[in-house]
Image: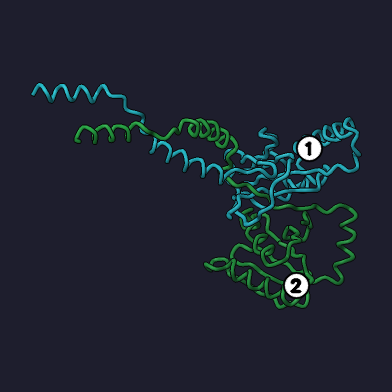
Amino acid sequence: MRRRNRRGYRQFIESDLEIMPLMNLFVALIPMLLISAVFVNVTVIDMKLPTDTSDAQAVSNTQKALNLAVTIRDDHFVVEGRKLRKQVVARKAENADSQLSEILVGIKQQYPDNEEIMIISQSRTLYEDIILVMDVSRESGMGSVSLLGEPGEQKGQE
Amino acid sequence: MRRRGRRRSHIRDRHTPLRMTSMMDILTVLLLFLLKSFVVEGEVITPVPGVQLPESSSETTPQSAVVIAIFDDNIMIDSELIASISNENAEADLLIAALADRLDEALEKSLLIAERRGEDPDAFEGQIAIQGDRQIEFEILQRVMYTCNASGYENISLAVVGTS
């Protein structure tokens, strides 16, 4: 009786799962995925620079437009535009970007047709600050961003 | 005493299969992680070493383009250093001469390829991807964009690191 039990136990040990085909699959799949893996998710913000013809259109449109502009100064953002009250957000505040976002969303609700926004930077303004303001304005529904230098020279248009 | 020794040797002789369970666990987790980071759509931009891209919520996937990397005051095209802003005359003009030369060359090459393929050269859209370090100043960006526009590249993509 005791012997029989022992044999049954041994039979149980010897019946193993056959996982070698699965291992083979993994060994092939993992190097392939490792090669094509993207660990840093790089995306882009598309911009279109003004050509001569679009420049002319831009000039003709300025008469009617809202001319909404965000100026990035060293310590504050200034939001201004035609028919709009000038608003200032201190950049030192922790929620400066959400405050700016609130202002822009408010303007968007007031003027739903307005897609354009100008971002006026000083020559020493950091790239990451410009990207931050571009993000805020895109999320507020104003997707057509123009980059300008402080003296008033237009460079880029999305 | 004798019996115990014999028994131990018997165990040692017995064929024991490799224990694969823990290894299978690791491989399964690794496989799932890699599948998650697998990207099929769009062109993959490899960040140039030394350039810390700014973060953004943009989700647009990059297209193939001429890559210009800017960090500190150096400008690189396709991983080759071509200009240093401090050496250029900043006051005279916004144009960066060395960059303009390289862009003109690249444009000529692209137009020639388009012509050989039988495509319409007017349909050519100059595409540039700018990889700017987060600490660069607007002045440099402005000059690079001005130079791109002057050389006929009108579509500019600013490379950023997606936060989502």
| Position of the N terminus of chain A by quadrant | top left
In this picture, residue B68 sits left or right of residue A39 = right
Q: Is residue A88 above or below residue B80?
A: below
Query: Drawn colour of chain B?
Result: cyan
Q: Chain of mark 1?
A: B
Same chain shared by disc 1 and disc 2? no
Q: What residue is pinned by disc 2?
A: A81
- Inter-mark Cα distance, 1 to 2: 37 Å
Q: Quadrant of residue B86?
A: top right
Chain name for mark 2: A
| Left or right for B31, reference B87 | left
**Numbered circle sitting on residue B9:** none
Element marked by disc 1: helix
Q: Nearer the viewer, residue A65 or B37?
A: B37
Q: Amino acid at mark 2?
A: Gly
Farthest residue, direction front: A1
Under circle 2, the secondary element is loop
User: Could you say where residue B56 lies in the image, as x and y percent from the top left?
Assistant: 62, 55
Tell me residue A38's x, y (percent).
58, 42
Of all chains in the rendering, the one displayed in green is A
Q: Which residue is mark 1?
A: B103
Q: Quadrant of residue B17?
A: top left
Amino acid residing under circle 1: Leu
Between residue B46 and residue A13, name the one nearer to us.
A13
**From the viewer's perspective, is B112 left or right of B143?**
right
Residue A37: x and y, percent?
58, 40
* Image quadrant in which the C terminus of chain A is located: bottom right
Residue at 77% x, 78% y is: A83
